[in-house]
Image (cartoon, rainbow, N blue to C red):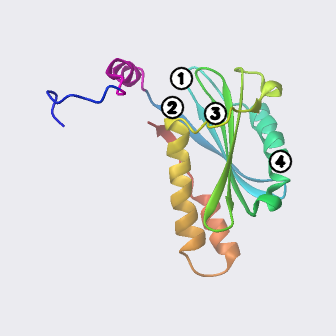
Amino acid sequence: MSDREELPTAVDTEALLTLAQGHHERTARTAGTREAGGHLVKTYALQAPGRTVTEQDIAAALRITAAHLELGRTRGSLGLAVLIMHAGGDGDYVLVHSWIEGHMSDLAIFTGPAGHPEQLRPGRTGLAPCVWEAAILAHERDAFSRHVLDSSGPISNRLAAWSADTLTGSVR
């Protein structure tokens, strides 16, 4: 598409350019694989510039995760999940992504004001991961497929490889 071609009226070029100008890297780090709600949970901390995810934030996110995952079997959960505790620029987010039957996944997003984990509540219907969260989830999709589904050998070895395969550093 050339610059001279007309764009559909739904394309908000000004908003897209403003969004692009404000796009930046965020830091992702692993916080280990832990048990919560009867699941193995690979845990991540994602931080906007000037924000930090503390151990207290991770603990609060794990409590929310455990409560959500306790009903996992009724949703067909396979017992593996990914938790992202995101200290965002506009608030805090907890994403709980679990693998369920039929090659499907389940995603819950909790939102709240920055620095107040006790105020995290389920996000609105239709809320989806932001670009930084989606980068972690894309890595996790590949790690799950590579180590659990496409690998061979005992499931304990597959799960150890899955747990060790993490995304850390800058996320765009």
Q: Are marks 4 and 2 in contact (CB under 8 Å)?
A: no
Between 41 and 14, the one lying in front of the other is 14
Q: Position of residue 52 (x, y in %)?
A: 64, 26
Q: Which residues are magenta?
A: 10-23
Q: In the image, which is nearer the foreground, mark 3 or mark 1?
A: 3
Within 10 Å of disc 4 (Cα), the crowding (few <14, some 14-19, many 20+) is some
Give the quadrant of the C terminus. top left
- In the rendered structure, the answer to whether residue 24 lies left or right of residue 36 reads left
In the image as oriented, which residue stretches furthest toward the bottom?
A: 153
Number of residue marks: 4
Let me know if residue 160 appears in the view: yes
> Residue flagged by tag 2: what amino acid is it?
Arg
> Residue flagged by tag 1: what amino acid is it?
Pro
Image-quadrant location for residue 56: top right
Query: Earlier along the polypeptide chain: callout 2 or callout 1?
Result: 2
Q: In the image, which is nearer the foreground, mark 4 or mark 2?
A: 4
Taking the magenta stretch, the answer to whether it contains residue 12 is yes
Residue indicated by mark 2: 26
